[in-house]
Amino acid sequence: MSYLPSTAAGKRTAQQLSDTSRALYERGWMPGTSGNISLRLPGDSGRALITASGRDKGSLSTRDVVEVDALTGRASLPGQDRPSAETSIHAAVYRVTGARAVIHVHSPYATVVAHRAGALDAVVSVRVERFELLKGLGLKDPAFTDLPVFPNWPDVDRIADDVADRLAADREGPPGLLLADHGITTWGDSLGQAKNRLECLESLCQLLVLSRTELHVSRA
């Protein structure tokens, strides 16, 4: 069943997801049906809208979203379409960070770094340092950051557990993470902030790739 918002806030939130999805698709960061975006409903931090599974992100409409419990990822209305397969990762971010928006895309440079640095069976970190653009992430110390790279387990809930554990242990870490061979996830207090952080991290990954320097990877 397609999403039918019952409130003006629900309609606005669905429209934000639709608009952002198309914008990221046009940049080549959400090709085909890949990627997912979620946003908590205004005035109700316990619920969120997330893009439905298997939807073309270039033509996503306001009806192609699913209302879920923000902290568990379970659909909160009966008979809805299936939410994104990675909903549990969004829920893990919401539980630990208190963010209001989460974006996951397959932007090319971040995906390349995730492919080069990622391990099959352990969480690792990629050191990003010296670049001026680090200041765009709002870090307490913008001289460097260690960007976590998680194994791309077939069981998405296992990825979500890894993410929750890492974020709980490092609340001062960057507002983003990589999935090995997969892509990048960012979050923020608003969809705009999550998108800005995504742009900064993708650009930083581009600089790492273009610099042709060896990645500084360590066990997390």
Image (spheres, rainbow, N blue to C red):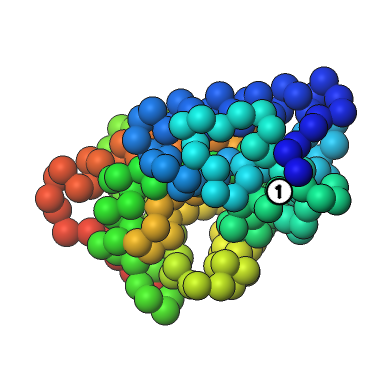
Q: Position of residue 14 (x, y in %)?
A: 69, 29
Up the image or down, 194 lies above or below 149; here it is above
Q: Position of residue 163 (x, y in %)?
A: 57, 63
| Residue at screen point 64% across, 54% down | 87
* Residue 2 relative to residue 194: left or right: right
Q: Position of residue 89 (x, y in %)?
A: 61, 57
Up the image or down, 208 lies above or below 11; here it is below
| Residue at screen point 51% across, 30% down | 59
Q: Label 1's element?
A: loop
Give the residue type that dot 1 points to: Asp
Up the image or down, 174 lies above or below 193; here it is below
Q: Position of residue 75 (x, y in %)?
A: 78, 52
- Viewer-nearest residue: 58 or 30: 58
Instruction: State how many labels appear.
Output: 1
The answer to whether residue 44 is visible is yes
| Residue at screen point 57% across, 67% down | 156
For label 1, the crowd category at 10 Å Cα-Cα, with few meaning under 14, some 14 to 19 and many 20 or more, is some
**Residue placed furthest toward the left:** 212
Q: Which residue is mark 1?
A: 81
**The C terminus sits in image quarter:** bottom left
**Residue placed furthest toward the bottom:** 121
- Viewer-nearest residue: 205 or 39: 39
